[in-house]
Image (spheres, rainbow, N blue to C red):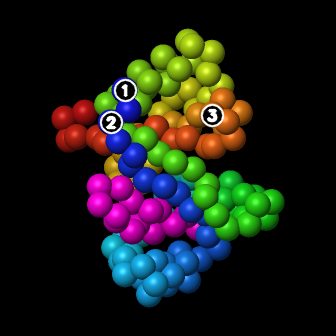
Amino acid sequence: MVKRVSHIAVAVPNVDEAAKFYEEKLGLKLVGREDIAGSKVTVGFIPVGETRIELVQPAATDSPITKFLETRGPGLQHICFEVDDVAAELKRLEAAGVRLIDKVPHPGAHGTMVGFIHPSATGGVLVELSQEMRNDQ
């Protein structure tokens, strides 16, 4: 079950350069960054209420974000919904015939577990499901 919008991801060539607009023009603040080796990206975080803008920069030439930037340029890359149990949601969606990118969750930013729904199933929008992991999980 979807709990909230966790973040909106924007593909950018450079997190620091992209953050300048949000800081200088909108008064928001880049509060951190994280390298996600498994996804070959560096992510910068800009909180906006309970949601974040995540600036996603490729960390390798074979990063999916590198290809995204080459074909589409900078811009909206995906929207992420927080769920209680990402593995259960992926199983439920697969059983319902929804096309998935990930059938099994994998580590995401902030110590989360994540899985992606294919854009062909969502009207063209890449959707990420994210589960916050507690110490006892």
Magenta segment range? Answer: 44-60
Pointer 1 with pointer 2, Cβ within 8 A: yes
**First of labels 3, 1 by sequence position:** 1
Left or right: 129, with 103 as reference point: left
Say which residue appears at 29% left-offset and 60% top-offset: 49
Asked if one can make out residue 128 in the rendered structure from this viewpoint, the answer is yes
The kind of secondary structure element at disc 2 is strand
Q: Amino acid at mark 3?
A: Thr
Give the residue type at disc 1: Met
Q: CA distance from mark 3 to mark 1?
A: 16 Å
Q: Marks 1/2: CA distance?
A: 6 Å
In the image: residue 100, left or right of residue 30: right
Left or right for 84, reference 24: left
Picture layout, residue 19 above or below residue 56: below
Residue at horizontal 41 percent and vertical 21 percent from the top: 88
In the rendered image, which residue does mark 2 sit on?
3
